[in-house]
Every structure is written in structure tokens, then in C-alpha cells.
Amino acid sequence: MVFSTLIFLFAFLAATILLYFILPYRNYRNFILFAVSLVFYGWGEPVYIILMLLSIAAAYAFGFFIDKYRDSDRVKARAFLVISLLVNLSALLFFKYANFFIENISLVPFIPRINPIANLTLPIGISFYTFQIMSYSIDLYRGDTKVQKNFIYFGTYVALFPQLIAGPIVRYRDIEEMLTSRKESISMFASGAARFCAGLAKKIILADSADKIVTSFRVLNEHEPSVLGAWGVVLAYSFQIYFDFSGYSDMAIGLGRLFGFEFLENFKYPYISRSITEFWRRWHISLSTWFKEYVYIPLGGNRKGLMRQYLNIAIVWFLTGFWHGAAWNFIIWGVYFGLILMLEKTFILRFLDRLPRFIGHLYSILLIMFGWLIFSSSSISEIGVYTKMMFGAGARFTTATVTYDFVRLLPFLALCTIASTPLINTLYKRITEKFSAAAILEPVLSGSSLLLCTAYMVDSTFSPFLYYIF
């Protein structure tokens, strides 16, 4: 099920809110959230509910043994931790990477060709809920959290539908108390509804419109390659993926607030960054935090010398790329950003600090956009074709159609540019601080955006979020 559909908004969500708030006790409310989350997850592929329940049950059961031996026998505790992690990772590795490994091993000379596994589909959200389960097991082993003895509570944590499909990746210790003692309120519900509407507008109005621009320019480039057409694809995709993914995160955070949960922020205006280092502190924060806490720091972080730090960065970014998908373009994308981060730590950051701010912004945006070209390409050859096209190799600068489309789209591109900065939010805060009556703007704007998005959804086709495939 997708947030940006009429059936979710006016059937599933409405029924969930009604059921949730007519029950007075926390145990019942968590059960409702767990049950409806399973319905939400199994809407398209019911069979994968079983897989998720097995993952939940395994981590839940092994958690007792990790907790039992954590202080008395670290060897046994570590053994149960490893088993728990392997059980959960095995499902992710099989469904997401089995065919990738089979196809690439078959390319090695003198090795008999192995046919890919037929009809092997990736369970939606498995990358996200697997990392959440792993964070619980690791934190339990470290003593950073307590064992959860209530299966429904633990299942609610893993399967909670607002962030189940595409994050943010929520660590158990961050919502442990909320599972048992959260307090819902009218103000929190209103804040959540407004945040959800803002995210929905990002997805429906901005991201889906940018997607159509990407498709249009790609078609034009197939017939008449042009520099401006190639940059149009990359620019539109940069807006699409930002508003699509940050819109989902806004909706997830908003939905969480409806039911008393406060999830951590996942985006902080990443396109205003002055370096790639800063960009990754602002983009998909929950994933960056996860890799930092559970991979980079355990490997030694920056505590064992410069060369070891570079190796740790390389490992983290290889895994970050591979986490996104079983394809070489994702691995190249991860290595690309890993190399840039190493260079920034070596000398680029010091150099940028001496330059005007706009140069740092320009440097960052160009590298980020090229990164999205790698990320969105369906093959390595496509990366090469578009790279050449962007720099004029075998392509004219523009065509009449591309020029016309760019001029026609300038207002939309300007809107996307402004919406990807804190400008609108800053102006709104200043207005409401100066004029108390302006507080009515939030419910008016939220209601208007909901009506507008509803109109769009009535007349649109199915449009899943980009990060559903990860």
C-alpha cells in the first residue's frame, strides 16, 4: 500500500485512527498498530508477511539469550548476536542479492553458467526493517537498551506502518519509551497531520511532476541528443528523488505523531550543502547514522590512523552503495561518494573554507547531480552515454524542443529550487511570530494541499515511492 493513494487516505488511515483512539489501553493500541501494519505490508504481497514475522520472531527470541548472557558470558552472548544477525541478513541477502551474484559469477571464465532464480521478487521494505531489527540486537548486546519481553510491542516497533517501507530507519532505543508510555495529544496530532500534508504535496505535486520531466527529456535525448537535454534529465531527477524521498519521510514523521511517536528527522535541506561531507549529514540521516554507529565506529572510525580511516570510509561507502541495490551502478555510486569524502578529508574541505560560499554550493550541487546520474542509470553504458552527452561529446548544445521545454518549465524548476531550501519555512516562522493571527495559515495550507493532492490522485496513475525498491 502507498501513502499517496485514495484507499490509504480515506479507508486505511481513517479506519486505523478510529480503531486506535476508541481503545483506551496501551496494550490494545499497540496491538491495533501491529495488526494494521501487517495488513498495510501485505496489501500487495501477502506471502511476505510470513517472512517479516519470522524475522521479528527470530530477533525477539534471540534477544532473550543475548540479554541473559550479556553480563555473565560474553562469548555466548556474542554467539547469539551473530546468529540473530545472520538469520535476518540471510533473508535480505537471498532475496536482494542472490540473482546478482549468480549473474556475475556466471561471467567468470571456466565456471558453468547458472540460471538466475526465476520469479524472485524483492520483499518491499526488507532493507529497512532488517536494519531496524539488527540495531535492536546490537544495542541489546552493547547494553544500550533493555530486552523487550512483549512480542506485540517488539512487533509494533519493527512493522510500524508509517516508516516500514522506506524509513526513516528507527533504532529501537529511540522509541523504546514511546512503545510503553507515549502520550498522544491534540497538538501532536495536528502537527502530525500538517507534516503529513506537506510530505504528500512534495510527493504528488513536485516529485511526480519532476518524474514526468525526466521521462520527457529522456525521450528527447533518444531522438536528438543534446547537452541541455542531458542536464535537464539530471536536474529533474535531482528534484524528483529529493521531494519523493523527503516527502515520504515527512509523511512517516507526520503519521508517527498521529499515534504519539516522534521519529528523528531524516532530511535537513541537503541541497544547501557546501560540501559532500555536509550533504551526507543532511541526506537520509537515519541511514548515515546507522552505518556510522554499527559499521564505521566498530571498524575503528578515525581512531587508528589516516590510512585505516580511509579503509573504513571505503568499506562503509561500498556497503552503502550495495545496500541501495543489487546492481553495479549502485556500487559505483557508493564508491564515487566514498572517494570524494576521502579527498575532502585530505584537502578539499580546507580549500573550500577559503573560497566564497557560493563556490562551495556550486561544487556540491554539480557533484551531487552527477551522483544522481550514476544512481538512476540502468547500466554502466548509460552512465557513459549521458556523461559524454552532458559535456557535448556527440551531441549538440540544444534543440528547439528542448529549449522550448526548458523555458516553459522555468517557473516549476524555480519553485523546486526554493522548496528545497529553508526559505519558505523561515518566512513562515517570521510571519507567524510577527502576526499571531497568521497561525491560521497552517491548517488552511494543509487542508488546501490535501484537497489539491486528492484531485491529483483521482486523475493519476499508480506512482510508488522511489525508495520502495530498496
Image (tube, rainbow, N blue to C red):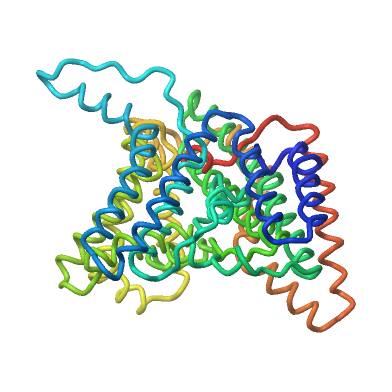
Name the residue: 37% across, 70% down: 143
Q: Quadrant of residue 136?
A: bottom left
Q: Quadrant of residue 193?
A: bottom right
**Horizontal arrangement in the rendering, residue 332 relative to residue 24 (left or right):** left
User: Which one is nearer the viewer's eye here, 458 or 344?
Assistant: 458
Looking at the image, the residue that sits furthest to the bottom is 434
**Horizontal arrangement in the rendering, residue 251 relative to residue 380 (left or right):** right
Residue 330: image x %, image y %? 36, 42
Name the residue: 73% across, 76% down: 429
User: Which one is nearer the viewer's eye here, 375 or 256?
Assistant: 256
Q: Quadrant of residue 6?
A: top right
Residue 463: image x %, image y %? 64, 35
Q: Give the answer, above or below, for where 210 lies relative to 132.
A: above
Q: Give the answer, above or below, for where 313 lies relative to 7.
A: below
Q: Give the answer, above or below, for where 45 lies relative to 333.
A: above
Looking at the image, the residue that sits furthest to the right is 437
Name the residue: 45% across, 63% down: 147
Residue 276: image x %, image y %? 39, 63
Residue 167 in view in this figure: no
Residue 319 in view in this figure: yes
User: Which one is nearer the viewer's eye here, 75 or 43?
Assistant: 75
Residue 39: image x %, image y %? 65, 38
Q: Give the answer, above or below, for where 343 lies relative to 39.
A: below
